[in-house]
Image (spheres, rainbow, N blue to C red):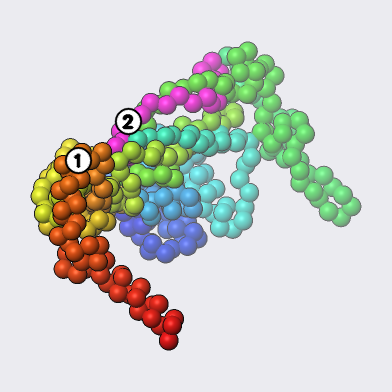
Amino acid sequence: MGKKDYYQILGVSKSAEEREIKKAYKRLAMKYHPDRNQGDKNAENKFKEIKEAYEILVNEEKRNAYDQYGHSAFENGHNQNTTYSTFTSSTDFGDIFGDVFGDIFGGNRNQRVKKGSDLCYNMDISLEDAVKGVIKEIKIPTFQKCQICYGTGAKKGTKPRNCSTCQGRGQIHIRKGFFTVQQSCPTCHEKGTVIQDPCRICKGQGRVRKNKTLSVKIPPGVDTNNRIRINNEGEAGTNGAPSGDLYVQIKVNKHPIFEREENNLYCEVPINFTMAALGGEIEVPTLDGRVKLKIPSETQSGKLFRVRGRGVKSIQNRNQGDLLCRVVVETPVNLNEQQKYLLNELGQSFNGFKGEKNTPRSKRFFDGVKRFFDDLTK
């Protein structure tokens, strides 16, 4: 069963503004929060659904990706629901009030922890992989949570202490005449805590630089400049804060046979002029093998033939594009004497290059040229 539409989950329209989305989230999150519905699995699942929808729609970049690609934009090996597998009253209700009320009424959130940076990885893939989808392994250098101190930055067996300068608030107030100015705490630098015994591995940062290997699922139908978002695979945050996200930027390499235009594929197919004149059947390539294409008699160079359903499946609506074959009549080369003689006989039978019956396009052209010069001499 497919996922529900995020707009329907929050009960807002697709044109809803950010403020409407936040209000809808607050109302639903308070109603279905697990702490208010102890032991109710349905309420817990509903809360996960609501929070997932909110986190996508309240972020402009993620919302644009969802509007363009639907749920496919976020299907990449990391189910977003895992983010919400554990609930605690203080954290989750704090998030609801901090994210919604704070943003709506202009309040400031506590600055003690800083989410990790998002990362971008440029990936080149073949046209075949872009059309059919593929799983790629990538290695990225990044900061990861220290496994010794579990991101706290403090020596094992100890923990950070509240900053005595700001009393754990991360900011201090300085009186200047009639005014009070709020600024960052010079001791803890807005963290609210200080580490007396730093972890020997991460030196108090709570994270270490490492290379990590990820399996990235490339969905069928992607194209150059598409981006795939992978939750929580960016840099680890400081002092145990959440990790950023990883964005995989796609570039589809040029193909030796096919060119892509949206969901259609194009290719040029050379044919000799005998087949162009008399007609016949040829085999043309597709990404799934070869198919037969019937060439009618008297086919002109540049004629476009459509092979339905042999293009790219749309990543948005799953409709299949077509393959369009442009035939090019090839002039023969390396002729032997007999071939030259036969062609010469054929040419004479056309009544020269201005033949009216066999080459009407040539006749129209030269008639037009004659009229042009006749008009100049009038």
Residue 148 is covered by the magenta coloring: yes
- Front in this rendered view, residue 319 or 3: 319
**Quadrant position of the N terminus in the picture:** top left
Q: At which x and y percent is residue 76?
A: 35, 36
Q: Where is residue 204 in the image (x, y as percent from the top left)?
A: 64, 21
Q: What residue type is labelled 2?
A: Ile
Which contiguous range is marked in magenta?
A: 127-150
Quadrant for residue 103, please give it. bottom right
**Residue at horizontal 19%, vertical 52%?**
344
Check disc 1 and give the amino acid type.
Glu
**Lower position in the chain sequence, tag 2 or tag 1:** 2
**Picture quarter containing residue 189?**
top right
Describe residue 113's horizontal placement relative to residue 330 as left or right: right
Tag shown at residue 135:
2
Identify the residue at image location x=45%, y=24%.
139
Q: Nearer the viewer, residue 137 or 194?
A: 137
Label number found at residue 337: 1
Of the pair 6 and 278, the residue shown nearer to us: 278
The residue drawn where x is 32% and y is 57% is 8
x, y percentage for residue 84?
A: 39, 37
Residue under the point 67% across and 16% down: 197
Q: What element carries label 2?
A: strand
2 vs 1, front mark: 1
Q: How far apart are marks 2 and 1 (CA)?
A: 56 Å
Q: Is residue 185 magenta?
A: no
Seen from the viewer's position, the closer of residues 15 and 139 is 139
Residue 149 position, x and y percent, is: 56, 18
Q: In this view, does 289 lie to the left or right of 44?
A: left
